[in-house]
Image: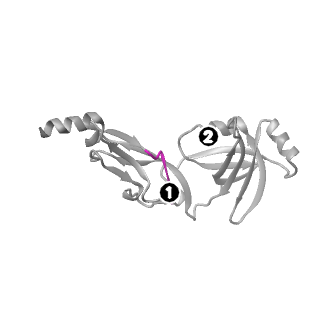
Amino acid sequence: MKHYAIAGTARTTGSKADIREVRKAGRVPCNFYGNGVENVAFSIDEKEFVTFLSQPASFIIDLDIDGKKSNAVVREIQFHPVNDRPLHVDFVAVTEDKPITIDVPVRIFGNSEGVRQGGKLTVNVRKLRVSALMADLPDELPVDITTLKLGKRINAGDLHFDKVNIVTPKTAIVCAVKATRNAVAAAAEAEA
């Protein structure tokens, strides 16, 4: 899996006024925690973080907090309800010897039989939550739809990848080919 470097500056935890000052300076307050790691309150540059958020890929984050480097994943992001600016971010420490749970993008490829018959492909899920060791995490999850027929779908439980466990509920629909009016009319004409 790809890595993304983010630099942070340690901050003191205090009152709401202190956090307001951090946000006024164009920074986002953050917390870094995990098993066997000391909790650290820090801040990161808001513009740099928004650039990170705008990318569709998933990353292992290389945090550099005042010279101390750690690997992490984003656990939670809180956004402002009106302007969608990030208000707070939680990072969780990860190691190479324990499984990591993270959302990985789905890449759909192939030319579906159902679409060739006039159906419409709908993609319900853009990312699936998976669990794997850091070395085994894929950059994307390829899903072949070549044999997907009209009225059929692919669920998360239908997908299997080497050394990767899919955590998303098995009943979650990844994609489906739905019948359109033209496809139904063409089928009726073919029967007549």
- 130 in magenta: yes
Q: Residues within 10 Å of mark 1 (few under 14, many from 20)?
A: some
Indicate the position of residue 109 as horizontal and vertical percent values.
35, 42
> In the image, what residue occupies the spot 68% across and 53% down?
91
Q: Nearer the viewer, residue 37 or 17?
A: 17
> In the image, what residue occupies the spot 57% across and 64% down?
97
Disc 2: which residue = 53
Cα distance between the residues tagged 1 and 2: 19 Å
Q: Please name the amino acid that badge 1 sits on.
A: Val
Indicate the position of residue 116 as horizontal and vertical percent values.
25, 37
Look at the image and tell me whether residue 173 can be seen.
yes
Q: Please name the amino acid that badge 2 sits on.
A: Leu
Give, as a single range, the part of the protein colored magenta: 124-131
Q: Is residue 24 left or right of residue 1?
A: right
Label 2 near label 1: C-beta < 8 Å?
A: no
Disc 1: which residue = 130
Q: Where 156 falls versus 86 (above or below)? A: below
Q: Nearer the viewer, residue 105 or 113?
A: 113
> In the image, what residue occupies the spot 27% across and 47% down?
147
Q: Where 39 falls versus 122 (above or below)? A: below
Most common secondary structure along the magenta stretch: strand
Q: Secondary structure at mark 1?
A: strand
Q: Where 44 falls versus 38 (above or below)? A: above
Q: Secondary structure at mark 2?
A: helix
